[in-house]
Amino acid sequence: MADLCVNLVPLFGALPHEKKIQIERLVHHKDYQKNEIVIDPTKGDNLIIVAHGSAKQYTLDEDGHENVLQVLHSGDYVGENWLFGQDNTNNYVETTVQSEICLLKRQDFLELMHDQPRLSIKLLELNMVKTANLQKQIQLLTLPKVEDRILRYLQTYADKIGKSSYNLPLKMKDLALYLGTTPETLSRELSLLEEQGKLKRKLRKVELVN
């Protein structure tokens, strides 16, 4: 079962083997190229699971500029609110690299919730975690110095993956949007941090220096 989408998602982790197989039969696997739209406001009734690769969830402001809400990696998911009837008025999910995405339709998901009440409890628990992560992002954006935002983001991501050396999960443009700055400022601040000996960088590869 190593390749099953449901094995990647904590939401389904506590279910017995036979239930995971049942859910997997309902999941639609699809390969997406880099920078391909998975979900937009015209089609927001699926649970989106990143099986392999990465994607970003964002909204658009009045000028058409992106506001990155979160970066999704293998095992991450988004769309549970839309499954419960909330309208997707301004949310987009776009791959940042070539990715395999699993889609679970709204009606199938609701039937699963009815059949497996423990999923409701698990969903509430995971939503609390997601809310906490969103609060961390808000706190990140309140830091007055871009330098501090960058370091906080890089350290948080390093802690998440358990590595101090890694490739940035976002393009510079997208990372700048996520951190509330411009690509030019981001590049300049990264260079300054490298000069200060706080990190090493080669293109998108970053190594934090303790």
Image (cartoon, rainbow, N blue to C red):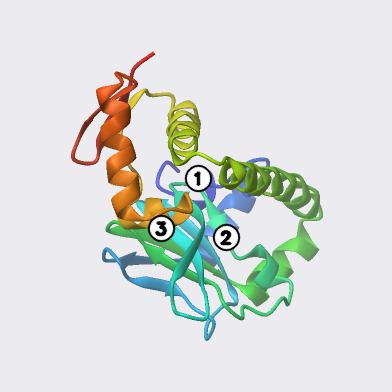
Q: Which mark is residue 8?
A: 1
Q: Residues within 10 Å of mark 1 (few under 14, many from 20)?
A: some
3D distance between C-alphas at marks 2 and 3: 10 Å
Residue ID at (31%, 36%) = 190
Q: Is residue 210 above or below residue 98?
A: above
Q: Is residue 1 left or right of residue 6?
A: left
Q: Which mark is residue 78?
A: 2
3D distance between C-alphas at marks 1 and 2: 13 Å
Toward the viewer: 91 or 181?
A: 181
Q: Is residue 19 left or right of residue 113?
A: left
Q: Residues within 10 Å of mark 3 (few under 14, many from 20)?
A: many
Residue ID at (43%, 24%) = 162
Q: Amino acid at mark 1?
A: Leu
Residue behind mark 3 = 55
- The secondary element bearing badge 1 is classed as helix
Q: Where does the image place residue 42, in percent across and percent down from the top left? A: 52, 86
Toward the viewer: 21 or 174?
A: 174
Q: Residues within 10 Å of mark 2 (few under 14, many from 20)?
A: some
Say which label, 1 or 2, has the lower sequence index: 1
Toward the viewer: 16 or 161?
A: 161
User: Which quadrant, please, contains the N terminus?
Assistant: top left
Residue ID at (58%, 59%) = 23
Q: Where does the image place residue 3, in percent across and percent down from the top left? A: 40, 47
